[in-house]
């Protein structure tokens, strides 16, 4: 049986959303992270022995275990913060999510950049209730190719 790769869920700090998006783009282009949202909200921190309050942002993403140190070096090099706070939590997800991450990082060492942006805009659509069970890949089915062939998804 093939040993599954190990991944981390990663949180990377940024003071502003634009900084977070810039850092997210840089790390994706280096194929060090899977990608994800830049979340923001009110926050309080103990900074220089004072409580400071301001909106704060976190990139939420995933990376392979062997890319951890390189990710830290690149994030610290590109971050605008005094301290780029990065946390790693061992990933334990569904088999389908595991397969998606393995597929996303497959061939990383040979490819220097991901493919370009998809020339499209996300849009909501109505889905018949009877179609819902067929839309999501099953973690217990064939996981050899997890990204859908459907060009609308």
Image (cartoon, helix red, strand yellow):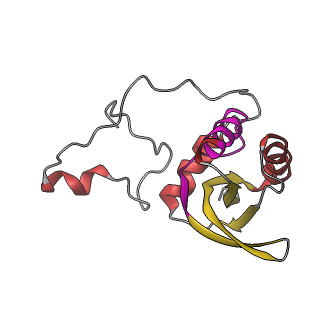
Instruction: Name which quarter of the figure residue 39 lies in.
Output: bottom right
At x 80% / y 54%, what residue is drawn? Answer: 68
* In the image, residue 75 above or below residue 52: above
Residue in the foreground of this view, choosing between 57 and 112: 57
The answer to whether residue 37 is visible is yes
* In the image, residue 110 above or below residue 100: above
The answer to whether residue 3 is visible is no
At x 62% / y 59%, what residue is drawn? Answer: 56
* Quarter of the image where the C terminus is located: top left
Instruction: Name which quarter of the figure residue 149 lies in.
Output: top left
Residue in the foreground of this view, choosing between 55 and 135: 55
Q: Which residues are magenta?
A: 19-41
Place of residue 2 in the rendered image (x, y in percent of width and height, measured from the top left): 66, 55
Asked whether, in this view, residue 74 is left or right of residue 2, the answer is right
At x 73% / y 64%, what residue is drawn? Answer: 88
Asked whether, in this view, residue 117 is left or right of residue 2, the answer is left
Q: How many numbered callouts? A: 0
* Quarter of the image where the N terminus is located: bottom right
Residue in the foreground of this view, choosing between 18 and 146: 18
Q: Is residue 147 magenta?
A: no
Asked whether, in this view, residue 104 is left or right of residue 70, the answer is left
Place of residue 52 in the rendered image (x, y in percent of width and height, measured from the top left): 71, 70
Q: Is residue 37 magenta?
A: yes
Instruction: Name which quarter of the figure residue 55 lies in.
Output: bottom right
At x 69% / y 68%, what residue is drawn? Answer: 90
Place of residue 78 in the rendered image (x, y in percent of width and height, measured from the top left): 79, 40
Place of residue 74 in the rendered image (x, y in percent of width and height, measured from the top left): 82, 42
């Amino acid at each position: 049986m093939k040993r599954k790769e190990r991944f981390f869920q990663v949180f990377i700090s940024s003071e502003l959303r634009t900084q977070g998006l810039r850092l997210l783009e840089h790390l994706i282009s280096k194929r060090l992270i899977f990608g994800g949202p830049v979340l923001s909200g009110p926050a309080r921190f103990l900074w220089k022995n004072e409580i400071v309050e301001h909106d704060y942002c976190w990139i939420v993403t995933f990376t392979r275990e062997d890319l951890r140190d390189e990710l830290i070096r690149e994030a610290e090099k590109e971050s605008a913060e005094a301290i780029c706070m990065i946390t790693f939590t061992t990933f334990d997800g569904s088999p389908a999510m595991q397969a998606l991450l393995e597929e996303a990082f497959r061939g990383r060492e040979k490819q220097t950049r991901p493919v370009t942006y998809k020339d499209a805009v996300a849009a909501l659509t109505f889905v018949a209730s009877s179609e819902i069970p067929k839309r999501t890949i099953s973690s217990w089915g064939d996981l050899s190719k997890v990204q859908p062939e459907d060009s609308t998804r």
